[in-house]
Amino acid sequence: MNLNIALFPGDGIGPEVFSEAIKVLEALKLDCSFTSSDVGACAIYKHGAALASNTLEIARNADAVLFGAVGAPEFDANPKAPVRPEQAILGLRKGLGLFANLRPVKVYEALIDSSPLKPEIVRGTDVIILRELTGGSYFGEPKFNRGIKPNREATDANYYTEAEIRRLMVMAFELARGRRNKVTSADKANVMASGRLWREVANEVRSEYPDVHYEDVFADALAMHLLRAPRNYDVCAMDNLFGDILSDEASQITGSMGMLPSASLGDDRNRHGLRRGLYEPIHGAAHDITGKGVANPLAMILSSALMLRWSFGLHDQASRIERAVEKVLADGLRCGDIKSPGTSVLGTREMGDAVAARLG
Ligand code: IPM
Ligand code: MG
């Protein structure tokens, strides 16, 4: 089985953590062919666009895409820059039809003390934040930031069609059936028209899955409950913006954003008859630590495990990676973001080596 993978390391710590994921994939001795491309700020500087047209082509021709991170401080400092690094990831999500973003939030027993929350609250947490990824305020029209002082105005429309909500909710129920059989849907139906449609459609889909426990929650309340009692949740489905925000929040249950992988999936099938997905850590380019060799590569490595599972059906190999990560943590090895008293702090490369050495 040949795995044809597009590699887009991107900016900041992206390339550093990326090398460690490739190291782990190579240690599994799979038959991989790689095609790489620049994305984000580095692509803007080289080609004038965050996502060059042939990069999208490379992604479409691959069975799966591994993605690092994009972003650069000079663009953050200039909100009106017409070309922005983030256009790379947004363009790939939209261009590949990756409407569902799975963000597993799993607490490792060894990392209990790295969470800012109390051990008795976080212990045993295993949630998937299922984020809608190609609609809502990220893509809705009109979208503008215009005018001159004192009459400047801006908007982002949180536009959703029922088909977009439906396919995401179907994914939520299907996922829940393979897990603990519970779906929580978060919206702001008390305020937003898009939230009322979300709730209506979610409840229609729910009636097709009578075996799955279901609840509607307001998104602001879920933000609170996730920190209060994260174990109450299994699959939490929500729109694009709420999913962006609540997944960063939920990462703190695990201790660090440096631990959270993600899988972005659509309905498109690859040469293996499985979903062509894009796999990326949820953390960003982290320019404050770029080039220092200290970034935690585990989210990136765990993203490659999700890729093996979802786009290639290689469940055993995916579990080998996940077990190796668990062993590394149990052996007291940490990167700086998850260090705690009594553990040894490793650099990015040493962490990659430690995972590769424990693949069994
Ligand atoms: C994420 C990131 C992205 C998003 C940025 C980099 C565009 O925050 O994947 O969560 O907002 O979706
Ligand atoms: Mg985010």
Image (tube, grey):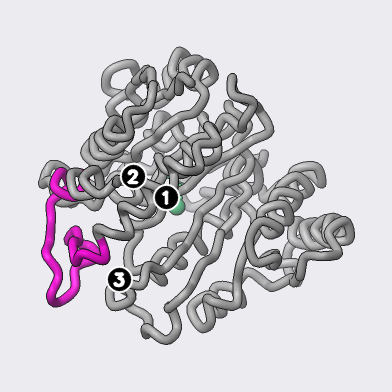
Q: Residue at x 84, y 55 (%)?
A: 205
Q: Give how far apart the Cα atoms at labels 1 and 2 are.
A: 8 Å
Query: What kind of residue is marked 3?
Result: Ala
What residue did someone put label 2 on?
301
- For ligand 1, tell me if the residue under mark 1 lies within 8 Å: no
Which residue in the protein does label 3 denote?
A: 110
**Residue 149: in magenta span:** no
Instruction: Give the residues drawn in magenta, as a range.
Output: 329-352
Looking at marks 1 and 3 on the same chain, the residue that comes earlier in the sequence is marked by 3
Q: In the figure, 86 relative to 329: above or below?
A: above
**Residue with the mark numbered 1:** 261
Looking at this view, is 136 or 226 the one in front? 226
Residue 344 drawn at (x, y percent)? 11, 64
Q: Mark number for residue 18?
A: none
Alpha carbon distance from label 3 to label 2: 18 Å
Q: Is mark 3 within 8 Å of ligand 1?
A: no
| Amino acid of disc 2 | Ile
